[in-house]
Image (cartoon, grey):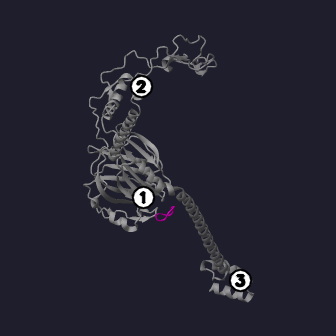
Amino acid sequence: MGGSQVWIQVLSAPARSLRKGRAQHRARAAALGGWALDAQDKMTGLRGLLLLLATSALRAQMQRHVYLREEFEDGDGWKKRWVESKHQPDYGKFQLTAGKFYADKEKDKGLQTTEDAKFYALSTRFEPFSNENETLVVQFSVKHEQGIDCGGGYVKLFPATLNQKDMHSESEYYIMFGPDICGFGNNKVQVILHYQGKYHENNKTIKCRINKDTHLYTLIIRPNATYEVKIDNKRVAAGELEDDWDFLPPKKIKDPYARKPRKWDERLQIEDPEDKKPEDWEDFEYIPDPEAKKPDDWNEAMDGEWEGPLIPNLKYKGQWKPRVIDNPNYQGEWIHPEIDNPKYKPDPTIGRYFNISVLGLDLWQVKSGSIFDNFLLTNDEEFAAEVGNKTWGMRKDVEKQWREVYEEMEKRKKEEEAQKKKEKEEEQEDDIWALEEDDDEEDPQEEPEPDRQGQDGGAERASLPQSEEVHVDQKDEL
């Protein structure tokens, strides 16, 4: 049998095997001998090659993109990449620092707010991109080492049209994401998305971290219109954009023509209709006094109808009520039937943004000191998690230990200062008492006051010789 014939038979073998079954295919392969087996191996290799090419093409479509990665590793070089807004002259200033406690003094440096009760407006620009048909990952870390009580710790993504030197709180943005704290009860992760000219806040309440350690915040928006929020690389919220934001009218509405039937019984329990009050049941708390007599001089024409006084009823048992039983006709709570909302139309473009080109810190803080670091914009979820673990993750435990040491040192310092202050106050108090005692010792040497001379005169005369006493008396007479 020629080689060309063998190839023809081998190439047609898979089709025949599908029609006649696996057993017939094996028999024919055995008849062909080694030629057929070699040809089958070649076909298997061809299929593997095609699969490899398809996988490579898919990987090419899913190529990793890193649009922004900022970890402030070049010292003051950040000042060339970040722009301060001049929209108002009194914006707060940022400085590059690792803060009061850290794991690595250089690698933990970030942008820190430095002025209390200030607005902040700082941004950095990168090449415009779109998340259409791609995943969008927004990630950064923030440390509120000052113990923030009211202020923002979030970032905003802006379109390329933003004038960075005029950025302010009313500048249009695409996404606002990160912790927002104001008081002990109002601390949450903001996830606000722009859609058709309006800003929509997440309907879920996602609690943020409020301690002084560095925390990693991650937002993932996928092309299938799902999302995920992570804190410290752990998922804290997830779902569908359409379900957790009010972008669109609801899919279902209550049927406007449906009405609850009049005889629908929603009473879970009812009074027993067969229960009767006993005949001897006394339900009057007070009764007329049977021994009371109408006064003889009572004039009904003048005094009205006489009514005897009331006394407590000794047989009083309280107000009688029939017992309560389960309602045999209970039908459950009536549920208003729903219908499809004619105004609802799905929109596959939710969460898609074009010309994303600026990341900004547009904040208000009452107490400054927050440090922002490890900014990352990418389309690769796994890469973002890896970067988070290699930056925040590798240093978080050491930072926490140093924070505890720092707080203990600060506590001791405050206690020592308080003790010194107390000792100083006690010394000042002792000095005041000493001065008062000195004044008391000097009082007897002072000249007697004029108004007391008359009172003290008798005593002085008693102690003088008689001649002198007469002499004084003569003066007084003159």
Q: Is residue 453 above or below residue 328?
A: below
Mark 1 and mark 3: span between their CA atoms?
94 Å
Q: Residue 334 occupies which quadrant of the picture?
A: top left
Task: Using a 10 Å C-alpha cutoff, classify the residue at mark 2 as few (fewer than 14 neighbours), some (14 to 19) or many (20 or more).
Answer: few
Residue drawn at x 29%, y 34% is 346
- Residue type marked 1: Asp
Q: Is residue 140 above or below residue 18?
A: below
Q: Residue 453 occupies which quadrant of the picture?
A: bottom right
Q: Which residue is mark 3?
A: 461
Q: Which residue is mark 1?
A: 373
Please tell me the numbered disc located at residue 44: none
Q: Is residue 299 above or below residue 186?
A: above
Q: Earlier in the sequence, mark 2 or mark 1?
A: 2
Q: Which residue is mark 2?
A: 27
User: Is label 1 in a helix, a strand or a loop?
Assistant: strand
User: Is label 3 in a helix, a strand or a loop?
Assistant: helix
Residue 315 percent location from the top left of the image:
63, 17
Magenta span includes 187: no
Horizontal side of 319 relative to 242 (left or right) equals right
Judge whether residue 367 can be spotted in this image.
Answer: no
Of 418 and 199, nearer the camera is: 199
- Quadrant containing the C terminus is bottom right
- Residue type marked 3: Arg
Of 432 and 264, nearer the camera is: 264
Of 28 and 412, nearer the camera is: 28
Mark 2 and mark 1: span between their CA atoms?
68 Å
Residue 153 percent location from the top left of the image:
41, 54
Magenta-highlighted residues: 98-106
Residue 163 percent location from the top left of the image:
26, 58
Q: Is residue 78 above or below residue 65?
A: below
